[in-house]
Amino acid sequence: MSNELLICRNLSAAVGEKAILHDIDLTIPQGEVHVLMGPNGAGKSTLGHVLMGDPAYSVTNGAIEFDGADITELATDKRSRAGLFLSFQAPVEIPGVPLRSFLRAAMEGRGPKMKNKEFNKRVRALADELDMDPAYLDRELGVGFSGGEKKKVEMLQLLLLAPKLAILDETDSGLDVDALSVVSRGMEAYRATCDGTLLIITHNTRILERLSVDHVHVMVAGRLVAEGPASLIDEIDAEGFERYE
């Protein structure tokens, strides 16, 4: 039981008066790769945001446990410090804030300060690993970046912060083959160097081809309706979600 990193018990959530998630029971052990699949509008991204504590959503029933603690009422920043990470389906742009400064602030928000020289060396090494031009570090966060470049930045942040659980929301959305390869490499590096745990939210199987998936969950209309081994991905790829709907 000690390796159960994330546990959702009978979790329900809403936006205002509109119920979106219904009675979610989900367990993700430490070090595993779990995939959440389902058609568009199934509530997959909502679950990611609820787990991260997005104040736009309210938990109406149930509980979320992370690393042995109840985080149901915990603020987003405290969940981040506890080791949760969420990559957004549409990464934000922050004019006037250099990427390097943003990454430094994210690091300092998670723990003790790192000396400038050490920090710059670490960031440069990770950028090289992701085939990212170091000049990007001095550009304004997300401003003028392509979709693939924004995803590279998220992978850079993921490797730098080394969270216990990374929730990746439609990370493959809109990516070309080259950008997809870089993102896949980033996930592999996270798994290898951080003993990281992944919850990958997707309706597409492209991003999963280079990963060893431990478990698959299927969501339809805000409910988890099926789960199984990695072979379930191939079934969904061939048959779609009709039988679950």
Image (tube, rainbow, N blue to C red):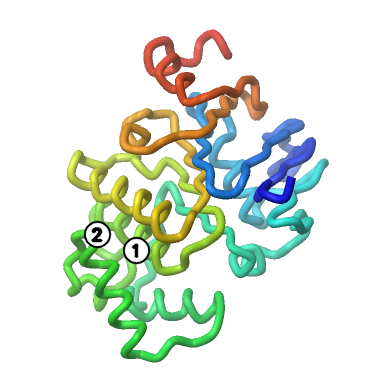
- Circle 1: residue type: Leu
Snapshot quadrant of residue 28 = top right
- Label 2: how many Cα within 10 Å (few below 14, some 14–19, many 20+): many
Q: Secondary structure at mark 2?
A: loop
Compared with 219, 4 (above or below) is below
Snapshot quadrant of residue 178 = top left
Residue 164 numbered tag: none
Which residue is farthest front? 2
Alpha carbon distance from label 2 to label 1: 7 Å
- Circle 2: residue type: Leu
- How far from the left and from the top, in percent, is residue 226? 62, 20
Front in this rendered view, residue 109 or 97: 109
Q: Are marks 2 and 1 in contact (CB under 8 Å)?
A: yes
Q: Residue at x 72, y 50 (%)?
A: 2
Task: Work out whether mark 2 precedes mark 1 in sequence or the reverse, and give the earlier one.
Answer: 2
Q: Provide the residue designation for mark 1.
A: 156
User: Total label count?
Assistant: 2
Image quadrant where one finds the C terminus: top right
- Label 1: how many Cα within 10 Å (few below 14, some 14–19, many 20+): many
Q: Residue at x 53, y 29 (%)?
A: 216
Left or right side of 2 for 86: left
Q: Secondary structure at mark 1?
A: helix
- How far from the left and from the top, in percent, is residue 108? 51, 81
Q: Residue at x 34, y 40 (%)?
A: 173
Front in this rendered view, residue 132 or 89: 132
- How far from the left and from the top, in percent, is residue 196? 49, 54
Q: Provide the residue designation for mark 2.
A: 130
- How far from the left and from the top, in percent, is residue 45? 54, 41
Left or right side of 63 for 122: left
